[in-house]
Amino acid sequence: MLTNAIIGEERSIVSPVAGTTRDALDTAVSYRDHEITLVDTAGIRRPGQVQRGIEKYSVLRAVNAVHRSDITLLITDATELATAQDAHIAGLSWDTNRGLIVVVNKWDLVNRNRFRMERVLHRVRERLHFMRYVPVCFTSALTGEGIEEMLDTALSLWQERQKRVPYRDLQYLLADAVSTHTPPSQRGNIRNRLRIRRVRQVAVNPPTFVFSVNDPKLLHFSYQRYLENQIRDRFGFDRTHLRLIFRPERAEKSSRSGIRNRAR
């Protein structure tokens, strides 16, 4: 029904019966001078509730649609917020490095007050604790409320995922981050301390950063999270997944040499 509200016509069959949508339907739309392909998929129910046969293959098509998308809209019911299955689907998007927007639909059915939205946001953030940066939109496919804001959020997120950071700016950030918070040593032995030589951005969608280090095994997850937060705060990556890769310095040199040789 949300797809119909976006395009303004009855493109998808709407029914309260689970499993009505079976195929992943692609629809081309134009919004604010951007060409967008909407992929309407079957809902992904909990594994124990998925029936054999047609519904099973519908779920597989929905998962494949996530893999080929740039941004995934996780549509959740305002009356059944942030279930464990929602977290599972969000995890699928996180594992595949896709952009994600949580869409709280049927917002018109909720008795709203000044604190209701804050409670909903807290519930979503709590359930998706591994993706606290994910934007949340409130919509009603029935009344059209929030549809335009949701599309604007999707465009903004897509543009954020295309952002490139100059190499020099990344080196300044790295120097500031290390001087402020030195990587911890392993078991109190200063010789077993992580040393980061440089960092560079190698891809977009998602923004991907490669750190050249002495030994990736010395990296603690908390320090990786610290570096990710530094990149987010400095360069405005507020709502997208970031991919950080830590490579041994020798391997990094070999990789860059191979790229130069192929260029010749």
Image (tube, helix red, strand yellow):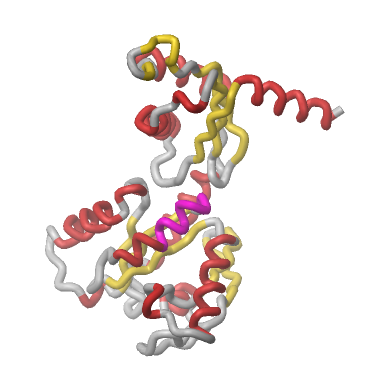
Res. 5 image quadrant: bottom left
Q: Is residue 104 left or right of residue 255?
A: left
Residue at the (59%, 24%) spot, across then down: 248
Going by the image, does 142 lie left or right of 260? left
Q: Residue furthest top?
A: 190
The verdict on residue 261 being magenta is: no
Q: Nearer the viewer, residue 160 or 178?
A: 178
Instruction: From the viewer's side, name the closer residue of 190 and 18.
Output: 190
Q: Please tell me which residue is depicted at 58% across the width and 59% down the height of the picture.
A: 34
> Where does the magenta region start and end?
89-97
Give the image location of residue 56, x and y in percent: 50, 79
Query: Which image quarter is the C terminus in?
Result: top right
- Residue visible at 13% across and 58% down? 115
Secondary structure mainly formed by the magenta segment: helix
Q: Position of residue 99 (x, y in %)?
A: 48, 53
Residue 100 higher or lower than 8, as above or below = above
- The answer to whether residue 80 of the structure is visible from this angle is yes
Q: Is residue 233 visible?
A: no
- Between 248 and 199, which is closer to the camera in this rendering? 248
Q: Residue at x 56, y 67 (%)?
A: 65
The residue sitting at the right extreme is 264
Query: How far across and how far down the image is residue 26, in percent?
Result: 59, 73
Quadrant location of the N terminus in the rendered image: bottom left
> In the rendering, at what x and y percent does residue 123 appear?
22, 58
Report if residue 92 lies within the magenta region: yes
Left or right: where 138 falls relative to 113: right
Q: How many marks?
A: 0
